[in-house]
Amino acid sequence: MKPLRIGVLGAANIARAFISGVAPSKKVVVAAVASRDMAKAEAFARDTGVARSLGSYEALLADPEIDAIYNPLPNTLHAEWSIRAVKAGKHVLCEKPLATTAADARAMFAAARTAGRHLVEAYPYRAQAQTRKLAELVATGAIGRLHLVRSSFGVYFDDRANIRLRPDVGGGALLDAGSYAVSLVQLVAGRRPERVSANAQMFETGVDRSTVATLEFADGLLAQISCSFATAYHRHALVAGETGVIECTYLNHPPVGGPPTVTIRRGAKVADPVETIELPGGNGFLAEADSFADLVAGAPAGWTGATPAESIDIAMTLEAILAAVRTGQPQRVDAFAG
Ligand SMILES: NC(=O)c1ccc[n+]([C@@H]2O[C@H](COP(=O)([O-])OP(=O)(O)OC[C@H]3O[C@@H](n4cnc5c(N)ncnc54)[C@H](OP(=O)(O)O)[C@@H]3O)[C@@H](O)[C@H]2O)c1
C-alpha cells in the first residue's frame, strides 16, 4: 500500500511535533507544507525535512500529489479550511477543538459527507493503549455503573501573542485544554450531557484562563471538568462506578508526562485491591496518523479517535459550557443541537 500523502496547512508549532512524530510511519508521509508566506513555508520545510513547500493554503488544496490535509490552524479557521479541503477532494485530520461552535462542526461533517471524504478530529491520546484500556474497562463493566467522572488538564501560558490567549482566533483554556477534558468525559460516558453549569476566571485579553464545569447526564451521571492556563502541567481522569474506580492520565505521548498506566480499584471497599496496569506508550501523533490512514484506506475499525457524532457532542458541550460562563446560568446542551 502506498503511504497516504499528507499536506500541512500552516507552519504551526504543533505541526513540527506532528511531522517528527509521524516520520517513522509506513502508512503516511508528510509530503508538503503550506504557509501564507512562501519564505516561512520554505524555512519550515527545511527545518522539518518536508519535501515541498507552498506559498498559500489554496495551492496545497489544489495539489494533486496530496491525498489528505493535517489542519493545525487557529481554532476559528478549522471549519473554513477543513470544508475547503474536503470540497477540494482531500481527507482531513483536523486539530482539536474541531470547531468553535457546534453549527460549524455539523457543517464540516455535512461537507465531508457530500464530498465523500473522511474528516476527523485529532486527539492523540485516543490512539494510546492507555486510553483504549480505560475505554475497554468501562465498556466491559469492570467498575459497574458510572456515577462520577472527573477530568482535568492544565498547562501554563501567559504570552498574549499565543493564539491560546487571543479571543479573535478562538483562544481560551476551555477550547484548548478543556476540549481534552470534555472529550474524556464523552469517551467514558458514551453520550453528551443534558445540562452544564460553569465558572471561569478570565485572562485580561478576554479569554477564559481557568474553567470548571459540572456536566449532568440524563441517567444521573455527574461529571466535572477543569482546565487552566494558569497552573503547572497536570492531566488526570477519575472514573468512578458502583463496583470500582479507575484513574489515569490520558496522555498524548506517554511516557512524556508520566507512565502509560491505568489504575483500577476492583471493588467498592477501601480494602479492595488496587491494580496498576502497565501499557505500552509511544508517540500519539504516529499512532493517530496510522489510524487515520487505516480509516482512509477503507478500514474504519482502524480509526481509534472520535467519531463524527462524538465530535459534534463534544462541540455542543463546549459551546454550552462557554454559554454558561458568559451568562452565569446553567445551559441545556440540546439548545446547541441546531
Ligand atoms: N493535539 C495536540 O496535541 C495539540 C497541541 C497543540 C496545539 N494543538 C492545536 O493545533 C492548533 C495550532 O496550535 P499551535 O500552537 O501549533 O499554533 P501556532 O503555532 O500559532 O500556529 C498556527 C498557524 O496557523 C497559521 N495562521 C493562519 N491564520 C492565522 C492567524 N490569523 N493567526 C495566527 N496564525 C494563523 C499560521 O501559519 P502560517 O503563518 O504559516 O500560514 C500559524 O503558524 C490549535 O487548534 C491547537 O488547539 C493541538
Image (tube, rainbow, N blue to C red):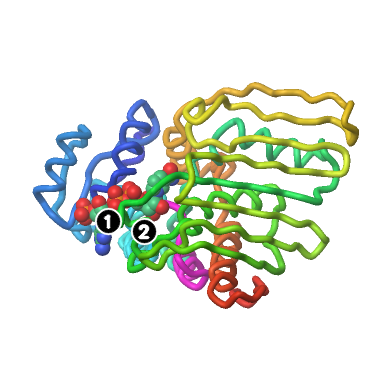
Give the residues in magenta.
Answer: 94-110
Q: Residues within 10 Å of mark 2 (few under 14, many from 20)?
A: many
The tag on residue 165 is 2
Q: Is residue 58 toward the left or the right of residue 5 in the image? A: left
The tag on residue 161 is 1
Instruction: Check the image and report above or below for 195 versus 259.
Output: below
Q: As rendered, which of 91 and 228 lies closer to the eye? A: 228
The tag on residue 131 is none
Which corner quadrant holds the C terminus? bottom right
- What whole-number distance in Å separates the C-alpha atoms at marks 2 and 1? 7 Å
Q: Is residue 92 visible?
A: no
Q: Is residue 303 visible?
A: yes
User: What percent of the width, then of the height, locates residue 250?
Assistant: 58, 38
Instruction: Check the image and report above or below for 86 versus 53.
Output: below
Q: Is residue 288 magenta?
A: no
User: What percent of the width, then of the height, locates residue 81?
Assistant: 32, 62
User: What percent of the width, then of the height, locates residue 193?
Assistant: 70, 63
Q: Is residue 100 toward the left or the right of residue 74 in the image? A: right
Q: Residues within 10 Å of mark 1 (few under 14, many from 20)?
A: few
Q: What element does badge 2 sit on?
A: helix
Residue drawn at (46%, 58%) of the image: 209
Residue drawn at (73%, 43%) of the image: 239
Q: As rendered, which of 315 and 259 lies closer to the eye? A: 259
Pointer 2 residue Cβ closer than 8 Å to ligand 1 = no
Counting the numbered discs, the total is 2
